[in-house]
Image: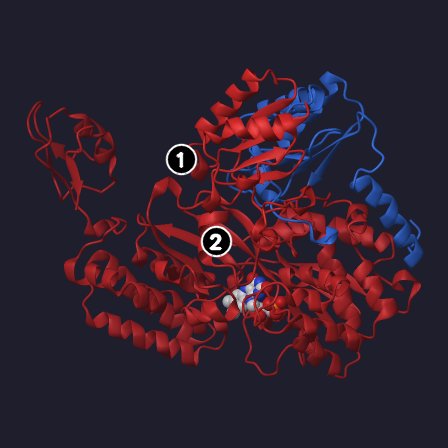
Amino acid sequence: MKNFILVCAGTACESSKADDIYKNFLAEIEKHGLKDDAQVIKTGCFGFCEKGPIVKILPDEAFYVEVKPSDAKEMVEEHIIKGRFVKRLLYAGDEVGDKENFEASDIQFYKKQYRIALRNCGFIDAENIEEYIARDGYEALAKCIFEMTPDQVIEELKVSGLRGRGGAGFPTWMKWNFAKNAEADQKYILCNADEGDPGAYMDRSILEGDPNSVLEAMAIAGYAVGASKGIIYIRAEYPLAIHRLGIAINQSYERGLIGQNIFGSKFNFDIEVRLGAGAFVCGEETALIKSIEGNRGMPTPKPPFPAIEGLWGKPTIINNVETFANVPAIILKGGKWHTTIGTKGSPGTKVFALTGKINNSGLVEVPMGTTLRDVVFDIGGGIRDNKKFLAVQTGGPSGGVITEKDLDTPIDFDSLVAMGSMMGSGGMIVMNEDDCIIDVAKFYMDFCVEESCGKCSPCRIGTKKLYQYLDKISKGSAVEEDIKKMEDISNAMKLASLCELGKTAANPVLSTLNHFKDEYLKHIVDKKCRSGKCKDLVSFVVNDKCIGCTACKRKCPVDCISGEKKELHVIDQTKCIKCGECVAACKFKAIDKI
Amino acid sequence: MAKMSLEDLRKMKDEKKKILDRREVGENDIVIRIGMATCGIAAGAKKTMEALFDEIEKQGLNETTIKQSGCMGYCDKGEPTVEVKVPGMPDTIYGAVNEDFARRIIKEHCVQRKLVDGGHIFDRPSRDILKE
Ligand SMILES: Cc1cc2nc3c(=O)[nH]c(=O)nc-3n(C[C@H](O)[C@H](O)[C@H](O)COP(=O)(O)O)c2cc1C
């Protein structure tokens, strides 16, 4: 076999004639007697749906876009038989442009994703340090130890503009600089692998796929600030990540890449793993420190900041897993290189866990400044089942929703805050018309009620009160003045809570109120829920299309449908549990959900 | 194991890079990687791996190596994910590889040297920054 013709059969391409394209290619190959020279196959989504349908021809790596079924003939005759590109269909990239003089060397590997933190994930054996070394592993640490002073390491990070990926986006170099300048006999490097946001699993994937990148970065941090001890705080619910971390730590100790006299130098750095019990608040840095110290995981007021007075009262750097995973690449390729990716205020990339009502859910890493539209509709392949987009939730329980009108805003730390949400750790949950925005706010508030540590009253009581109001709204017993009360409570929580958990817990409420006030009012005033998620606000009624087939009656789990054969059926509203089974059973669209 | 000096690191890097980049491979030197992160395992990657091993043995592909890797990110449609490197064939990523499909990969891709049809092929998610 010499050539492979890959026809995208992803959902978006499939709906625009990918199947006809596939068939036409098969027919052309047959017609020209090329069955032994070229194979036609369907593939999964290439993630460039806006330019679909897409056809890729290997081994030439030719990437053809907006292909029509009728193009198959020319593509076979030119590319397969004569070995010439069909230039008019070739994706030439934004930079290459001139398709007429297109050379094979101009072929652009088209990708919206750009992977720094995930550079090795899925492509190396995570349990074999030698494969990490083959991918320039521990080369950055060697460069720091032998070629750079601690100040130069921090300067490189400053140039890079790297900001913390754990949520707040604090400049990494600044934190390191504080800790470096603090005088102490011992300093600590902590890696925050608590990852408690619902729907987030970026950090777990990095630790499972490339644990050594985090170990190397922690050692670099140790070198930069003068710390000889590192601790990774990870939730016990991540057994595989813990297992792989253990293997990586053992292998790096065996080779002297961690431990005493690294590479025979004077630099020592030890790393150990501490398990957390999986409380969201323990991801907050001061609570995390308390937890490592053996106390209850409760936040303490800042200042003092951990960089000055952290674990056991010593200067402590605490960074997120993904922040660390970026560091070796920045040291190797230079801070300046890092600024060429992403936006001015937020250089580099961000990993997102894309979930919800989307076609290709998964883990993606994109340059900062990518629009939400690109993430959702290109990489994500659009909304599942051709439903209508409603909103995207970012920032987890501390974040908010982003709606249609902001789909084209480039996303970075600052723009998300301006939109009333935040980056958070990178969970991105896509919602469609079937979702109820009140239900979403209620979900996050329920989470915060559970996870509030209870130390300060604004958070402990505020989350509970907000939940009660949302519950009232979802049951149709709220009044319009309740909105004002919710806003007052939210603002008090923002001002008076001890840590960011309480300070931001009201964000999902404020953000949904801001973007979907009409939905709130529909629930409160009209006592209606558009999506039907709030069960107390919907009722199922039989309309006159009913022919009396009894299908619904037989399906109803609580026997609340009455009516004889061939007669109009009736649903007893007092008994109905709104499960929707009758709607699913009816073949005549005779039951309305109102 | 002896502790490494900087020279040792560089030497190991060069040696292992040659293997990882598959310079100097023999005709039957096949490498298969299977995504074994939590998401992959939840989707059945362990069964997939057993099927791969079993079929490799049946087909007598003695020079084949199977390796475990992490998550490539194709969590929804793509797990379990399997990457196949066969000399003379384009490196290929297959998604949603159940036991049956795993056997087809060995029989069709590794033995007959044809891509396996059915919409399972995925593209690499991004460029490789280390090769830029
Ligand atoms: C309630 C709460 C939970 C948090 N959870 C995490 C977490 O799971 N992982 C994380 O890296 N940071 C989390 N943070 C942020 C940390 O407090 C801290 O800012 C971060 O670890 C610093 O690392 P970075 O600068 O690399 O982002 C959380 C903060 C709050 C308030």
Percent x, y for residue A202? 58, 54
Amino acid at the residue labelled 2: Asp
- Chain letter matching colour red: A
Give whichever of A401, A268 is nearer the camera: A401
Would you say the beta carbon of the disc 2 residue lies within 8 angstroms of ligand 1?
no
Residue at 78% x, 41% y: name it. Answer: B21
Q: How is the image coloured?
A: by chain
Tell me the residue at 88%/54% (across/down): B9
Q: Where ligand 1 lies, by quadrant?
A: bottom right
Marks 2 and 1 belong to one chain: yes
Seen at 67% across and 19% down, the residue is B107
Indicate the colour of chain B: blue
Can residue A288 be seen here? no
Answer above or below: position of A487 versus A326: below
> Which image quadrant for residue A174?
bottom right
Question: Where is mark 2, residue-wise?
Answer: A374
The answer as to whether callout 1 falls within 8 Å of ligand 1 is no
Disc 2 to disc 1: CB gap under 8 Å: no
Position of residue A573 measured from the top left corner of the image (x, y, whole percent): 13, 43
Q: Position of residue A408 (x, y in %)?
A: 43, 60
On the rendered structure, is A75 left or right of A395? right
Between discs 2 and 1, the one toward the N terminus: 1
Query: Does residue A72 appear anywhere in the picture?
Result: yes
**Amino acid type at image mark 1:** Ser
Chain assignment, label 2: A
Left or right of A518 on screen, residue A206: right
Q: Secondary structure at mark 2?
A: helix
State the mark number for residue A425: none
Q: Which mark is residue A15?
A: 1
Q: Quadrant of residue A425?
A: bottom right
